[in-house]
Image: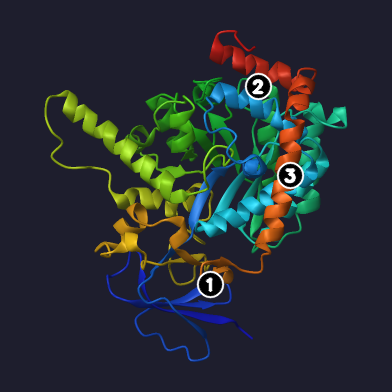
Amino acid sequence: MSKRILLKGGQVVGGPRVPADVLIENDIIAAIGPSIDAADAEIIDVAGMLVAPGFVDTHRHIWQTSIRGVAADWSLVEYIRFIRLGYATAYRPEDVWISTYAGALEAFDAGITTICDFCHIMRTPDHADAGIEGLDRSGIRGQFYYGFYDVPSEPRSFLDHDARVSHARQFFDARFRARPASALVTMGVALTEFNLIPVAHTADEIAVARDFDIPLTMHMGTLSTPDSVARLAQAGLLGPRMLHVHCNASSDDELKAIADSGGALSITPETELQMGMGIPVTNRALAVGLRPTLGIDIVSDYSGDMFAQMRIALQTARAMDNQKVLDAGRMPPEIDLKVADVYDFATIDGARAIGLDTQVGSLGVGKQADIITVRQDGIHHAPRTADPLASLVLQVRPSDIDSVFVAGQARKRDGRLVGVDVAAVRQRAQASSDHLAAAFAEAMQRTGQTATRATYGSELARATKGDVS
C-alpha cells in the first residue's frame, strides 16, 4: 500500500501567495494545489507555515563535527597546521562515524536535506567505511566524495597514492556498484589539491570518477594553487561533473572556463571571509554565467546553518556591487542581487550543480519529496513578512524548522528529530571530542614524521613565504 501524507494549508515558497496543499505519495510529490482531496492520507496542518524544498549543501567536511568550534579564530594557514596536520591524525573510524551521523542530523535540524560530504580523512579503509555508514544510518540524501589526501595512516602502506586510488575503486565496487538508482547516498571523488601532487596522480584520481561515471569535487583557487583551474585546463583535465570549491583567487577567465566545461561552483562565504581566502566570487561568477551554490564547509569553525550562508553571500555580494557605485561618488539607486537569487543558490542551483535538479531543489509534481516546513509564529516573525521568500532568506532561524522530509520520510516533526536518541548521540559525540582534544598535542608531534607533513608543509610554505613553524 502507498503511504500518503498531505501537508495542508501552508504557503508554498515560490508559488502564489495563497495557502496550498502538498500531497506526498511514498517518496514523491504527487500534487500541489488548493484543497487537495486525500481522505486516506495522514493530514499535517501546516497553516501559517512556509513549505519549501530542503536545502542543498554542496560542500561540507562532515567528519569535522566532533571538533566543533576549534577553528573559531583561525586563518587558513592555522587550519592546515592544526587540523590537517593535527586533529586529523588522531581520528579513529568511530570518530568519523559519529561525526558523520551527528553532522547529518544537524543538517536535518537546519533544513538541509542533501549534502556533499567531502571526506578527506581516509586514514585507513575502515575510515572510509565509517563515513558511508554514518551517512546511510542518518537517512540523508548525499554524495559521499572519497578523498585522496595523504592523511597519516595505518597501515603505512595506505599513504601510497596508488594504494588509495586502488582502494577507491574497490570501495565503489563493494559499497556502491549494486546500489539501486533510487539510493539516497551515492559516491564521488574528492581530488587532492591540484599542483600539490604530480599531474599524473591528479589524472589517476579523475580517472576513478570518469571510469565509474560519478562526480568529483576539489578545492580550487586558494592559497596553494591560485591558478589551479587554468593549470587543470592546460593538462587537459578540466571537464563536466566537476564541482569546484572556493575559487576566490581564480581569474574571470578561469570562472568562465568552469562554466564552459560544464562544471559547477560551490562557495562557502563564512570560511572564505574569515580565513583569508578572499571575497566570495558570487558577483564575478554570475557575470560569466556561472551560478554559485552554497556550502557549510566546516562546523569546526561555525554552525551548520544555511540561512547564515545565504545572508553572508547575499550581503557581501551586494556590498561589492554597492561599493563600485559609492567609489564613483554616487549612491546605489537599486540593488541588483535579490533574495530569490541566493535562495536558488541554496536549492535548485545546488541540486543542478550535483546533477540532481530533476529530483530535488524545487517543489514540483513528480519530484522527490525532500521538503521542509517552517514556522512563522515566533516573536521575530511579528508582524509576519509579506514576502514568503524574503521571510525564508532573511528572517527565519534554524529553530523555526518544524518538519523535514527526505524522499517522503519524516526526519524531523514538530521541531524534533524523528527516531533519534539525541542524548545518546550527544554523549557519543562528546566522547569523540574528548578523545580528539586529548590526542591533539601528540598527533601534532607524530604528523611531522609522515608524508603529509611534506605535502602540506609545501602548501604552508607557499602561504607563509617559508614560515611553517
Instruction: State the residue position of label 3.
Output: 432
Q: Amino acid at mark 1?
A: Ile
The part of the image, by quadrant, that contains residue 64 is top right
Image coordinates for residue 81, horizontal then vertical, percent: 64, 22
Image coordinates for residue 161, horizontal then vertical, percent: 77, 27
The part of the image, by quadrant, that contains residue 416 is bottom right
- Residue placed at 60% from the left, 9% from the top? 467
State how the image is colored. Answer: rainbow
Distance from disc 2 to disc 3, alpha carbons, whole Å, reads 37 Å
- State whether residue 100 appears in this view: yes
Q: Nearer the viewer, mark 2 or mark 1?
A: 1
Distance from disc 3 to disc 1, alpha carbons, whole Å, reads 37 Å
Image coordinates for residue 105, horizontal then vertical, percent: 61, 57
Q: Secondary structure at mark 2?
A: helix
Instruction: State the residue position of label 1.
Output: 28
Q: Nearer the viewer, residue 144 or 82?
A: 82
The image quadrant where one finds the C terminus is top right
